[in-house]
Image (spheres, rainbow, N blue to C red):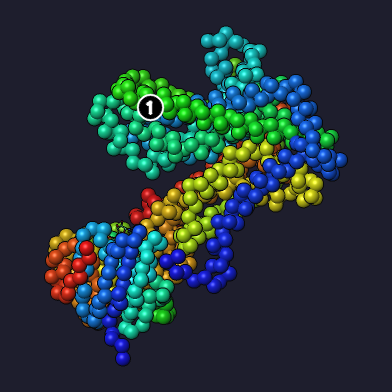
Amino acid sequence: MPDPGLTLDRVIIQRDGRTLVDISDHVAPGEVLTVMGPSGSGKSTLLSYIIGTLATGFDAAGRVILNGTDITDLAPEQRHVGILFQDELLFPHLSVGENLAFGLRASAKGRAARRAQIDAALEDIGLAGFADRDPETLSGGQKARVALMRMLLSGPKALLLDEPFSRLDTERRDQIRALVFDQARAKGLPVLLVTHDHADADAAGGRVHRLE
Amino acid sequence: MSLRCETTSARARFLPWAPLLTLAIMVGPVVAGVLGTLAPAFGYMPALGGDGINLNAFATLFDWPGITRASTLSITTGIASNALSLLLVALICAAWSGSRAFRIIERMLSPLLSVPHAAAAFGLAFLIAPSGWIARATSPWLTGWDRPPDLLILQDPYGLSLIAGLVVKEVPFLLLMTLAALSQIRTQQARDTALALGYSPVTAWFKTVFPRVYAQIRLPVFAVLAFSMTVVDVSLILGPTTPTTLSVQILKWMNDPDLSMRFLASAAAVWQLALVAGTLLLWRLGEIVIAALGRRWVASGARGGATRAIRALSLTAALLSASAIVFGILGLLVWSFAGFWSFPDLLPGAFTLKTWMRHAMNLWPIVTETLIIASASTLIALLLTLACLEAEERHGLRPGSRALWLLYVPLIVPQIAFLTGLQTLAIFTGVDANRTAVIAVHIVFVLPYVFLSLADPFRAWDARYGHVARALGAGCDGVLWRVRLPMLLRPILTAAAVGFAVSIGQYLPTLLAGAGRVQTLTTEAVALASGGDRRVISVYALSQTALALLPFAFALFVPAIVWRNRKGLRHA
Ligand SMILES: Nc1ncnc2c1ncn2[C@@H]1O[C@H](COP(=O)(O)OP(=O)(O)OP(=O)(O)O)[C@@H](O)[C@H]1O
Ligand SMILES: [Mg+2]
């Protein structure tokens, strides 16, 4: 039986012959691996390799294995790896509820059933009744919660976080951080956290990998 | 490449070919047309008994007494209108960019741009004619005229009214291109630095910003130069008559029932092409000279001044140029409803619906035809453009700066030079001149504009939305249809409106590809020019303008309504 969790097997990413990222590691379910490094060191690049959206111009080698399945050659939408960016990137043309419905896999069938699931999800994040709101009219903390829930509804098997807390004020930050880590732990998801903030790393409590 | 899209469906397999197909559709007819012009020009047209290579047609051309005048006119109108427009645009930007007046000017651009050339030319003609609005407004109290004076203001032999007509239409176009360039290169800092060094605003702009902006708008400037050297519809309305400009003369020879005149017409079209190439070269030399002088000017450290004088001058000129179109259209409106209107009354004695009523029935099929052609060519151009841009995204098929030239090929190669050849080819290969042919030729001109107007917003879209959508389980098509295109609704509709307006305005392509049998508002309006019935002309020119403006209103209001509850897209 292969190890559950997210395995990075000698992942090396180069640009113009210069090595940006060189990492081999295993993140167990519920564990948080924090990746730190100066700006431009390749943290976001590593995450885009894992979700399968690495820009052309990079040379990348190494395998990404999720719960024993090699996902390196899969299309992004087949990898079941969720990502949160610093910006919430809620689709501006969709309502809050439609944003969540975008995340909810089509395997959840029936309009009424999907709607009920979305209402329940909104209630979970303390935003009951927000389904028809324009995402642009939400506060930063509310947007962050919607983005998190949208990702969770897509049924990810791993979480990638690209400085998702850095835009929030201190109080919100603690709150959202706790929410994310609690959800990840509860669902037993391996988490890769990219951050500049030592407080994030401390809160995550896991190991820290440094990129030069 | 890295995005790994599904590649098995027919549509997905077509996508990598989209750029090539688009190129073929856009540049193919130009190349074929130029060849179709070259062959008969050098005597080769077997169907008419020409199967050798000779220079007879050129000999006839250079024996034509009007050749020197027509050639000179082509060069002078082209250079004068292009230089004037460019100077005016540069002065406005130098003196006013960043101000409130500038934002007002920006907002007036789209409607001014969408007014078709022919309508703007008619409007101007009705303003400046001896019996036009300007003469009426100043008579008799200022001029002493109580009859229209016997002056050759319109269609003057020097082409001055033609130049004026071109300038009013080219200023908005070049300004739009300049604004696009300004938004790409960050100019504020350079200018502010120069201001801090004690340069006056206008001088600061010319010394620090203009050289970089010009490098970006060079191709549009070339396009404008080639266009104004060879324009036919504006020239038929405002240009000199004896002799006419070269392009108008070529059209006359083309329409001669004596088919052997096609040798002469083709030779003249080749000569016109050579004139354009030569003038572009001359312009390029001018650029080098001005750049050298400019370097010395920069090195001189002169701080400049006269800011207020230049501000006043440029704003006056800009207002004059804009009002020529605005009052021109207003004049058309008044004429179309005018009853009896004697000189020098400023307004008609009575207003009546008679002209509109009388022409409503004739107008209807022509409006329909115009709409069908514009919709079809715009839709196809839009689909091809989106396919190209999406192929660029999925397969990394990004055109280099050299490929950008190709977009300008249909805009720089004069229409008259390749459309004559296309018509010749069509006649002797038995291809029917019909609506389909007109649509195909319109696409050649609509495509570059649609592409140019959509490419920047499409590429500027934040790709992370796509990454998020894919991480959430959407495929490449899902991202395109469910996220990207809806978010880009406004720029897509704007690009469509631009394409639509371009198609509506086409005169020569409609005339030659349709062999005179496909009637659009533009061909009909221009055909009425020689008759001189201002009321009827106004009805046609106004209908033409309305049709071109409508999609811009659409592009403004549809997103505003569809996304009325979406703050994040209000300014997108
Ligand atoms: N699409 C791209 N094309 C070219 N170079 C890129 C691209 N994306 C990133 N880079 C380069 O790759 C390097 C790594 O970028 P990356 O975004 O991964 O850094 P980062 O560690 O996330 O930095 P930050 O902390 O500022 O977010 C940088 O030098 C960046 O300039
Ligand atoms: Mg980053």
Instruction: Tell me if the residue at label 1 has its CB under 8 Å from ligand 1.
Output: no
On the rendered image, what quadrant is the C terminus of chain A found in? bottom left
Residue B251 relative to residue B328: left or right:
right
- Asked whether the viewer can see residue B119, the reply is no
* x and y percentages locating residue B146 in the rendered image: 61, 11
Residue A143 % position (x, y): 27, 63
Element at label 1: helix
Q: Which residue appears at 14% of the width and 74% of the height? A: A205
Q: Residues within 10 Å of mark 1 (few under 14, many from 20)?
A: few
Identify the residue under disc 1.
Answer: B295
Q: How many marks?
A: 1
Q: Is residue A198 left or right of residue B460?
A: left
The subunit letter for the residue under badge 1 reads B
Vertically, is A7 above or below B65? below
Image quarter where ligand 1 lies: bottom left
Tell me which corner region of the image, top left, top right, bottom left or bottom right, holds residue B36.
top right
Horizontally, residue A179 falls left or right of residue B460, namely: left
Q: Is residue A58 visible?
A: yes
Question: Based on the displayed image, in which of its 4 quarters is residue A79 positioned?
Answer: bottom left
Residue at x-position 17% and y-position 74% = A207
Instruction: Name the residue: 56% across, 31% down.
Output: B281
Which corner quadrant holds the N terminus of chain A? bottom left
Q: Where on the picture, by quarter, is residue B81?
A: top right
Q: Report the front residue among A78 and B511.
A: A78
